[in-house]
Image (cartoon, rainbow, N blue to C red):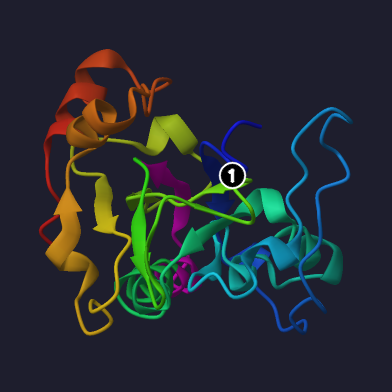
Amino acid sequence: NSKGTANWVSWQLKRSWLGSVDRCGGFSPDSALPSNFNIVRPNDYSGSGFSRGHMTRSGDRSNNQTDNCATFLMTNILPQTQDQNGGPWLELEDLSRDLAQQGKELYIIAGPAGEGGTGTKGFAEKIGKGKVTVPASLWKIVVVLDKPRLRLKGMTDKTRVIAVDMPNITGIQKKSYKDYLTTVDELEKLTGYDFLSDVPEVLQAALEAKKDDQ
């Protein structure tokens, strides 16, 4: 409510979520928010120099129109530079989709950190007449399970975990997501969150400390 964005967004991705429906017709405010909340509207981003950046990707919910349109609610959107959105962020989204198409089951968490990014119109801490906070960076964690439906039982110290923290700036469109790899431990320090908290403690410690090298 205070920032006009989600603190984090989390979703599952596997082959059954993927299909060929057309992208939803447009962005919309989230009517499920409490009536006293700061309601962010699509035009709060207009002329800001920042894109309406999806956290749960539209293509990750392409099996039916209802699910796809849910990704266009403004509670799933963050002010994101187009260079990040169409560059390293997109590369990681494409990798995630490819892994799902291969039959893997992914659990993904993404969100904003800090305040103030540099879009096409320069540096900004707020847009939409102060309603929406521009993050300094966007982070994401992708847990890749090789055997769907096993969930926690399918996790080992070999389970792939991809963690990134990408600056919300222009000039990085040709960068790779690999340039921004980090660890879950580092993202916990950055955000104050306790990620992968349902994973057994010893395994959680091992997974959160390693940086992806695949």
Residue 68: quadrant of the picture: bottom right
Q: Where in the figure is residue 46, as x and y percent of width and height?
A: 65, 72
Q: Residue at x 20, y 17 (%)?
A: 202
Q: Is residue 156 left or right of residue 44?
A: left
Residue type highlighted by circle 1:
Thr
Q: Is residue 33 visible?
A: yes
Q: Where in the figure is residue 137, as x and y percent of width and height?
A: 32, 52
Q: Secondary structure at mark 1?
A: loop
Residue 60: quadrant of the picture: bottom right
Q: Which residues are magenta?
A: 97-113
Q: Where in the figure is residue 189, as x and y percent of width and height?
A: 22, 27
Q: Residue at x 40, y 80 (%)?
A: 86
Q: Is residue 18 left or right of residue 194?
A: right
Q: Give neighbour class at mark 1: few <14, some 14-19, many 20+ (Cα, 10 Å).
A: many
Q: Residue at x 42, y 45 (%)?
A: 112
Residue 35 falls within the magenta-colored stretch = no
Q: Residue at x 19, y 77 (%)?
A: 175
- The C terminus, quarter of image: bottom left
Q: Is residue 12 left or right of residue 71?
A: left
Residue 111 falls within the magenta-colored stretch = yes
Viewer-proximal residue among 48 and 15: 48
Q: Is residue 114 left or right of residue 93?
A: left
**Residue corresponding to mark 1:** 5
- The N terminus, quarter of image: top right
Q: Is residue 207 visible?
A: no
Does residue 139 lie above or below 50 as drawn?
above
